[in-house]
Image: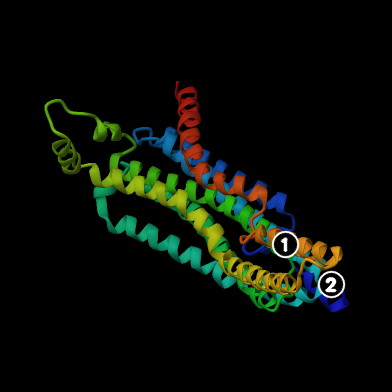
Amino acid sequence: MSEDEAGTTQELSPLVAPFSLVFRRRWVAALFVFLFFSLSWLGFVLFRIIWFSWNIIYWKDELTMLIAFVAAGCFSLYLPHLFCDLCGDLVAQRSSLAENFGKQYRKFHDSRWLIPFPAALSTVFIIVRYAAGREFDPFQTWSVDFVFSIWLFFGFFTILHATVLCARYTEVAHLLREEAVEGRLSRNEIHTLSRFYLKVAIVATIHFGFCAMVMSAINMIYTYHGTMIWSPLDLIRWRKGLSFGQQFAAMIRDPLFPDIMVMLLLHAAVSIAPVVYLIFPQWDIHKLLVHRKEGLLAKARQDLEDIEGRLTPQSEIAEFDEFTRRSRNIESLERLPEWPFEVGGSIGTLMLVVLPTILILGKDILLEVFVNIITK
């Protein structure tokens, strides 16, 4: 590797804006994220207990958001680390990729995307909340609601920051597509890229799961003031004396049916989106592998036909051995994978679907126990 190429890869820092503006070590930035959200929320709790005790503390929903905000900040620190590891692995295999990865690193982690965009969207969310008026006011005191909105702003910022990184990394495969099409990308390099996408997809499924929980928690706080007396399971209970069609009609007419369906669709999307995220960037690589496989099979089959056409009962044993060897080559080529996933990838892909459900159930169980302990 040349000195210029080495310098290009060395300048890839796992810390990106806004963390890179303040911190030099990831663990310090992660500690700050944890302490900032945890202590600010605890301060907000004490603020209400001491001065505004008549305001509700939405323990379960606020803790859900706290966990999601801290997780999003940590994901924003972990994702660039994964990208830098990918760059190092691929550049170690082929130093000519160093300059391209340097350019892509700067493109993906441009502070104009990572700071103004999440900040602007977070501001819009807060403005929409106040534009809705007093109808969705979960607090009885304006100052409490204002402090809560500030805390939500920073939480939304971290969530959107991590989301931007997940979205930008889908373009990594496009950088390597030209290398792959021209046959310069080896199968080992393709597997390295695939492992990267599997790790990012697992991070994304946890992140998207937390995003769904935040939306559900906000809906509970602003719409139901933290308490939904009516259970969503009432939708599917069997009502005596009604036919199946009447049961279905009664379910649809229920006033809470739209809210429940929106949340169910949201969680379904959270389960499906990471799998799509894993497959979509690798579709071009899949087509390349299919093209390569078909080309190799066509050549091998043509050679086999040529040898078969020359065989006669009087042919030498060596020619029959050559025919057998080429037949086995075709069998081996037919078993070549057409997707860049490895054996471990199938297990990881299954985790992408299962993780959101595990998170939701685990969150509900653990938080219920924790809240019961601290509120007794």
Q: Nearer the viewer, residue 299 or 8?
A: 299
Label 1 Cα neighbours within 10 Å, binned few <14 / some 14-19 / many ≥20? some
Separation (CA) of disc 2 from disc 1: 46 Å
Location of the C terminus (image quadrant): top left
Query: Residue 9's mark?
Result: none
Q: Secondary structure at mark 2?
A: helix
The answer to whether residue 225 is visible is: yes
Residue 69 position in % (x across, y down): 52, 48
**Among numbered discs 2 and 1, the one appearing first in the sequence:** 2
Q: Nearer the viewer, residue 19 or 342?
A: 342
Left or right: where 83 falls relative to 371: right
Left or right: where 144 falls relative to 287: left
Residue 365 position in % (x across, y down): 47, 29
Query: Residue 327's mark?
Result: 1
Disc 2 or disc 1, which is closer to the eye? 1
| Residue at 62% from the left image edge and 54% from the top image edge | 198
As shown in the figure, which amino acid type bears the numbered disc 2? Ala
Left or right: where 192 falls relative to 221: right
Location of the N terminus (image quadrant): bottom right
Q: Secondary structure at mark 1?
A: helix
Residue at the extreme front of the image, as rendered: 314
Label 2 Cα neighbours within 10 Å, binned few <14 / some 14-19 / many ≥20? some
As shown in the figure, which amino acid type bears the numbered disc 1? Ser
| Residue at 59% from the left image edge and 51% from the top image edge | 203
Query: Residue 6's mark?
Result: 2
Residue 310 position in % (x across, y down): 75, 74
The answer to whether residue 106 is visible is: no
State the image quarter where residue 331 is shown: bottom right
State the image quarter where residue 130 is shown: bottom left
Residue at the extreme top of the image, as rendered: 376
| Residue at 65% from the left image edge and 68% from the top image edge | 293
